[in-house]
Each structure stands twice: as C-alpha cells, then as structure tokens.
Amino acid sequence: MNRKKNGDGHTYPFRNGFRTIIKVRGISVSATGKTEAEAKRKAKEKVKRSERLNWGATTQHANTTLGKFMTWWLKTTTAMKLQRPRIVDTNNWPTYRSSRS
C-alpha cells in the first residue's frame, strides 16, 4: 500500500459522488464531485485560491513585477511624507481673560 503525497487530502464516498478534504495549516478545505478525480481537482483549486487570498495576491496583480511594485510603493509612501505640515498661526487666536483679574 502506497502512502499519499502531502496535499492529496482524504477522499471518501459522499451522497451521489465523492468528497475530498485537504487540511492546510490547520484549515480544512473540502470539495465534492461525481468522481474521485473531480473532487480532488476541485479541492486543490480551492486550496490554491485560498492561499492566494491569504497572501494578498489576486489574479489581477499576479503578474506584477518587483520593479512595478517598488515604483508604486515609492510614489504612494513618499507622496504622504512630502506633504507640508500644516502651520497654525496662534497669534490670531482670540484671547480670553478671566473675570477674577
């Protein structure tokens, strides 16, 4: 009897098909399908999707290069730092005198 590879999960008969459960970093991901292969494929796709979401990478930005990211990061972070601080002129503030003077 051969051992399964890591990430294959556990597949068993379920209703009119099969269910596969894969546990990754303590989180269980399950999927059902009409065949064992379909259930495994769907579960592995869910794992890949959830890993992308957990790391913040989306399919929209999956092809972003390090250079593009660094350019964007420099523009956004330095733009906030380069804003001039607001100077408040305290000479124009009204003065209040105490009635006990």
Image (cartoon, grey):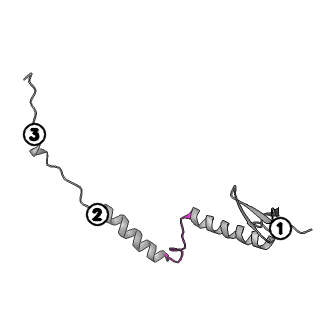
Q: Residue at x 24, y 60 (%)?
A: 84
In the displayed structure, does residue 74 sit left or right of residue 96? right
> What secondary structure predominates along the stretch shown in magenta?
loop
For mark 3, give the secondary structure. loop
Q: Residues within 10 Å of mark 3 (few under 14, many from 20)?
A: few
Amino acid beneath label 3: Pro
User: On the image, numbered disc 2 is attached to which residue?
Assistant: 82
For mark 1, give the secondary structure. loop
Give the CA distance from mark 3 to mark 2. 32 Å
Q: Nearer the viewer, residue 30 or 81?
A: 30
Name which quarter of the figure residue 20 lies in: bottom right
Estimate the x, y position of residue 85 in percent, counting from the top left: 24, 56
Estimate the x, y position of residue 41 in percent, counting from the top left: 73, 72
Q: Is residue 35 above or below residue 21?
A: below
Amino acid beneath label 2: Leu
For mark 2, give the secondary structure. loop
Q: Are marks 3 and 2 in contact (CB under 8 Å)?
A: no
User: On the image, numbered disc 1 is attached to which residue?
Assistant: 4
Q: Are marks 1 and 3 in contact (CB under 8 Å)?
A: no
User: On the image, numbered disc 3 is attached to which residue?
Assistant: 94
In the displayed structure, does residue 82 sit left or right of residue 38? left
Task: Compare marks 3 and 2 and give the one earlier in the sequence.
Answer: 2
Amino acid beneath label 1: Lys
Q: Residues within 10 Å of mark 1 (few under 14, many from 20)?
A: few
In the displayed structure, does residue 79 sit left or right of residue 100? right
- The furthest residue to the front: 16
Single out the mark in the foreground, 3 or 2: 3
The boundaries of the magenta stretch are: 55-65
